[in-house]
Image: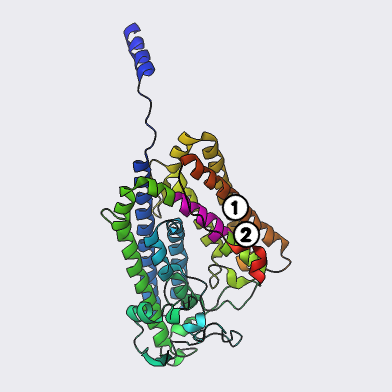
Amino acid sequence: MRLSLIAALTTTVFAAPALAATPEEVARTYTDIAAAGYGDSLTTAKALQAAVDALIAAPSDETLAAAKAAWIAARVPYQQTEVYRFGNAVVDEWEGRVNAWPLDEGLIDYVDTSYGQSDENPLSTLNVIANTKFTLSGADVDARALTPEFISGTLHEVDGIEANVASGYHAIEFLLWGQDLNGTGPGAGNRPVTDFAQGADCTNGNCDRRAEYLKAATDLLITDLEYMTAQWAAGGEAREATLADPAAALSAMLTGMGSLSYGELAGERMRLGVMLNDPEEEHDCFSDNTHNSHYYDGLGIRNVYTGSYTRVDGSVVSGPSLSELVAEADAAVDAQLKAELDASVAALGAVKTAAEAGLAYDQMLAVGNAEGEALIMGAVDALVTQTASINRAVTAMGLSAAIEGSDSLDNPSAVFQ
């Protein structure tokens, strides 16, 4: 017994201390989470594709509801990958194909007469579904075949106008829900399923082309997600480039966290809508799913810092984290940032909870809605607060990060000019 005790004490006293995480290990975790997140985005998009095919084959209230549910489910993993957009050129250059917003939906399909012609976009009411030919810069464009290639190569951001969004999640969202004509009142888009019916049951015309466009846009989303999933998979270019320069990877992580926290989410997606009281500024404006998109953006920011991501199947991808490196450099900064990340996720969760209880995000934006404004601004303030600590982490690590801003936060008067 005495010898065993001495051996145990000796082992305790002289055991080597656990090695801190290395930048190389943290960069690998970052790529592993990216691969899992984009892989889940692809998997859920394929489920959406199957639901869209079922809707087109047999339009009914049930198949339309199933396609909508599949779209909402597909947003959960994708939004958690948005933190990779900032700091990774390969993602930023690609992102506009899958998540660009807001869009001039009249480019794609019929819109209400109240929609009006945009002064900045002559194609804002093109309605390509109803027109097999249109003129661009004096040349005739053949739009008879609504294929993925036509959407991506000809129609998307046509004429160099960013509002001409023809592909991605939001184009599909519009085709499933239709316009939300409720302003800041209750209710989302309410496209009738008969918009996809064939023959005499078709409403609003061109049901065959509407179905053709929806299928092509969904198939194109799959292709785009396959590309990005491959970028982060074993041997993928984005993964290999990240692993080749761990210091740059750490800067990219902090840039992504800060830019999504501050300029994009707190500023462009949240604070701006409150300032303008404009439901058109909500991210998922046709489906009233904005509360979820914002929440999962916030979760994605925290995932990167803590080095942990919960997949759609419930399994967890985790590893050495950026948090460990920051803690080694400045434990106080790490503790504060982790607490603030939890606080922002909780504040975004409060917005989500309120929306699920019946106060939709666009209703929160209404003039005089004090409860809605408090919920949104509570999340904005939490995101702004954590960005300051992200900057402290950058300094503690001796790194640099180009964190994007927003006029709504940095120069509010410019918003109204």
Q: Which label sits in the foreground, 2 or 1?
A: 2
Q: Position of residue 66 (x, y in %)?
A: 44, 70
Q: Quadrant of residue 269?
A: bottom right
Task: Between residue 170 and residue 242, name the one nearer to us.
Answer: 242
Number of numbered discs present? 2
Q: Residue placed farthest to the left in the image?
A: 235
| Residue 117 falls inside the magenta stretch | no
Q: Image quarter for residue 227?
A: bottom left
Quadrant the C terminus occupies: bottom right
Element type at mark 1: helix
- Amino acid carrying label 1: it is Val
- Against 332, residue 6 (above or below) is above
- Mark 1 lies on residue: 384
Q: Secondary structure at mark 2?
A: helix
Say which residue appears at 34% left-offset and 62% top-offset: 228
Outermost residue on the top side: it is 2
Percent coordinates x, y for residue 295 in the rendering: 53, 57
Residue bounds of the magenta highlight: 253-266
Q: Which residue is mark 2?
A: 409
Left-right relation of 223 to 70: left
Contact between labelled residues 1 and 2, with CB atoms less than 8 Å apart: yes
Q: Position of 228 compared to 107: left or right? A: left
Q: Residues within 10 Å of mark 2 (few under 14, many from 20)?
A: some
In the image, what residue occupies the spot 51% across and 55% down?
Answer: 403
